[in-house]
Amino acid sequence: MLPLIFTAMVIFLGGTLWTVVYSFTKSGLLPRLTWDGLAQYERLWSSRKWIVSIENLAIYGVFSLIGTLVIGFTLAALLDRKIRGEAVFRSIFLYPFALSFIVTGLVWQWILNPELGLQSVMRDLGWQSFTFDPLNNPEIVMFGLLIAGLWQGTGLIMCIMLAGLRGIDEDIWKAARVDGIGTVKTYIRIIIPMMRPVFVTSLVLIAAGIVKLYDLVVAQTSGGPGISSEVPAKYVMTAMFGGQNLGQGFAASTMMLVMVVIILIPWAYLEFGDKKHG
Amino acid sequence: MKLSIKLLSATAICAGTTAGAVDLEVMHWWTSGGEAAAVSKLAEAWDGTGNKWVDGAIAGGGDTARPIMVSRIIGGDPPAAFQFNHGRQAEELIEAGLLLDLTDVAEAEGWKDLVNPPSLLDACTIDGKIYCAPVNIHSWQWMWLSNAAYEKAGVQVPTNWEEFTGSAQALRDADIVPLAVGGQSWQEKGAFDVMALALAGKDAWLAVNQDKSTDAVMGPEFTRVFEEFGAARELAKGLNVQDWNQATAAVINGTAGAQIMGDWAQGEFAIAGQVAGTDYSCLPGLGEVALLDTGGDAFYFPVNDDPEITAAQKELAALMLSPDVQVSFNSAKGSLPVRGDVNLTTVNDCTQKGLDLLAEGALAPALTTLLSPDTVTQLNDLVTEFWSMPAMTAADLQLQFADIIGAAD
Amino acid sequence: MADLAMQNATAAMTQPLGQTLAAGPRGRKPKKRLSRANIIVYGTLFVMAMYYALPLYVMIVTSLKGMPEIRMGNIFAPPLEITFQPWVKAWQEACTGINCDGLSRGFWNSVRILIPSVILSVAIASVNGYALSMWKFKGSEVFFTILMIGAFIPYQVMLYPIVILLREAGLYGSLTGLVLVHVAFGMPINTLLFRNYFSSIPEELFKAARVDGAGFWAIFFKIILPMSLPICVVALIIQVTGIWNDFLFGVTYISSPDRYPMTVQLNNIVNSVQGVKEYNVNMAATLLTGLVPLVIYFASGKLFVRGIAAGAVKG
């Protein structure tokens, strides 16, 4: 047990340090210790693609976070109403999570394509002015990605929420009813505050998914139209494996890590400040 | 029980080695129908020598396969051979002394005299030593046109770029998109490079891509290229697809007039049952300057401690360029052979045009041999940004293009 | 019609709930309002299910069509002529390089990777989470923070450093090495999952057990674990899905093509760049690969239900 935990530490700490060190080098196809100072960082921050990537991540991040939490919780709450066919519904919501994105990204690409997908169906049905073409419009392409991202990611969050709901005492519901509190109100006032740890877990899971967002973009838009749906993780991967410029990729990933740490450390203090089981 | 199995397998290995049979693991990214058929020709030939081909296919092109190959090399357990594109991608591996020097094989087999065009071998050569075995030629310089689309629009199938742009309005009137371009940066940049070579000519093209001359980027020849590329952006409006073969499908269906894409696009036409000349037409070099760029694939062989494997690696390298293998492999793959002294078995109109150009020596080096992958990535980003942003003018593109070329290594 | 039937059925099912509500102080919640609530519940679920199922529908329909029909481009139309050939091809005929035996080739390799990785990572994460939430130990906060940062690192960035680590440990290319990597990468999120779940377990329970003299493992196995079935299922779902679908680690850290996981074949079928694309086979291959996680999802549903009973124990 302990050796395994030790291994994980070595991998995360060692790997991170290694990455940071090599971000100051000229490493191309192979990692090499040819020092390059801050040149990789200068290039990174003068790249328009990187700036666009960060903006996109912010937009996608906010909407994905809210969307996933709301949809995930709502679905879980609905499934928890002792309904029929729960297993079927749960599996339908969760199945997208099981499928490789190389192909499901392609399917969403088709569905959102104006000539093949929803738009053409609506027009065939007679709604001639119906226009829905998110993937080819730089302004809203991130929302096109969001539609597929929510589709893939909410199922898991629903499951976590469901597990959280199942951990809540039946007596609390009974008490709420006795007090005459409505269902929705009970959820908002009583259940959700009780599920704070579950929400924190979901938050981290979603946030990690957002930061690592990559496959979805490659499969659906490959960063396009133009560079309007580029994201940081894709910038890293393209630099490392496409452009054979490891140093640039490591510099970008180091910046990503710095941003994560800036957000994470204060949160960690908050969490540990709350010594429930001290 | 276990022991006996071990003993058995040990004796099997011994038996194998005494017979001189060696297992070589070969990594490549050829997996779809015709590609897989082509690989099996190589494997059959190798197995036919009494050795064994262990196939390590990883699809997704270089971006997917390359990190895996590099990991294997860093991890100290490299495959016996792996595929890269000709060009500058392997430079670093060679400099680090990780790849096997094939110079003696090349000399024994007379590659210098056989390989046509010689530039292929140059791409494998660093400091006078040869490090790779080129196996085929793929060229980007093609425009594929739908005969049905032009018939529907009531105009002749164009024979050069000027006629193509001239007939574009007729296609639009018939509700056909003149030019099909998939929305991925490598496709847009690919179309740009084809237009650059065809419209600016080889000298200006080399000045830009080989000599990295910013003056040439700003010169009159390339100014025309940027302007025409801006016009092409208009001609491509109305078809929104991502994958290159969806764009090809639009040409096959006749919903688009033409596509600029490498010779691998012929595979899609063939599978759709279309015949070169009657159903579709092809224009090398857009019908302007008919040159082939000589891109393609080559095999590299990581250094190995075991002399037996090293010998087998060299044997495999020699085999890959042998006449029979060249014919069977390239016939299956739809690419052109790297030696001038063989004839392919099945040749259609378009392939014949390519072979003729090859025989005439109407050739240009592949872009991957001139520009580093890093530069290519930067240019891809720039071109795709231009392609999707109507507000960006051809002049903007030209200036930023010059910046990247000026900074290229 | 069907909706109506469903509605009646559910109205009958939620009868007990109706009774308790009617017993409430304001007592004006007759059946009508309840059934409206049910319409909302089922209506929302159906609409959402449509959104989730639409791409699946497109995939299934496409996988049953021939290529000429797909090229015509009507993605929602049911197949004019149903063919199962793409499924057969995806499973046992599709070529990836010289091996033409489809996905079946890597299936058992994937299973061999999946089982130890999942068991180990769920076991370790649950103990980690338990230790972190109940037994604060020295350095636990640093440990946890590092783990959290680990959750945010794009794993592709770690590709080469891990190669070097595994090489130095003499594990490069072996199954053990790959399992270790999977366990390590699954650790952050699953540890967090368990830790936060356990931290909502009432403290009194834990304290009482300690007063009774129960030790670290006794508390874990006798009290904590039986209460945590639903969260174990979630961890199982995350790990099975992630490891089953992993391509990059499997292909990078296992150095012989004979032992590649199934996802390598999947990638080879769906991801060719210059080759001809057979969309129907691609869809069939993707759906086939997704079946194993799907079976786990269905099967684990029972444990979800049992979680309620276990949850009731603690009250």
Image (tube, coloured by chain):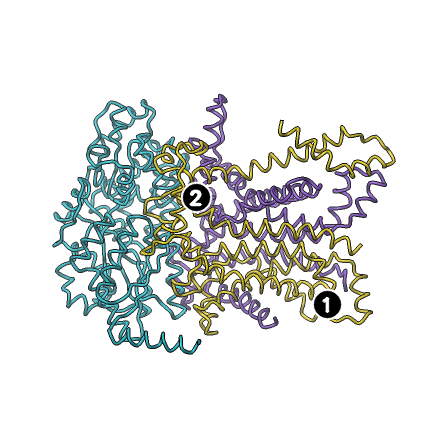
Chain colours: A purple, B cyan, C yellow
- The spot of residue A277 in percent (x, y) is 76, 62
Q: Viewed as shown, does residue B295 lie left or right of A131? A: left
Tell me which amino acid carries mark 2: Met
Residue C135 - label: 1
Q: Viewed as shown, does residue A105 lie left or right of A8? A: left
Q: Which residue is drawn at 70% across and 43% down?
A: A80
Q: Earlier in the sequence, mark 2 or mark 1?
A: 1
Badge 1 density bin: few <14, some 14–19, many ≥20, Cα 10 Å: some
| Viewer-closest of B288 and C304 | C304
Q: Dot 1 falls on which chain? A: C
Q: Which residue is drawn at 60% across and 44% down?
A: A62
Q: Viewed as shown, does residue C91 lie left or right of C306? A: left
Q: Dot 2 falls on which chain? A: C
Tell me which amino acid carries mark 1: Trp
Which residue corresponds to mark 2? C283
- The spot of residue C181 in percent (x, y) is 51, 64
Residue C145 lies, with reference to residue B204, above or below; the image says below
- The spot of residue B25 in percent (x, y) is 32, 64
- Discs 2/1, front: 2
Q: How far, Cα to Cα, is label 2 from label 1? A: 48 Å
Question: Which image quarter: residue B88?
Answer: bottom left
Residue at disc 2, secondary structure? helix
Residue B290 - label: none
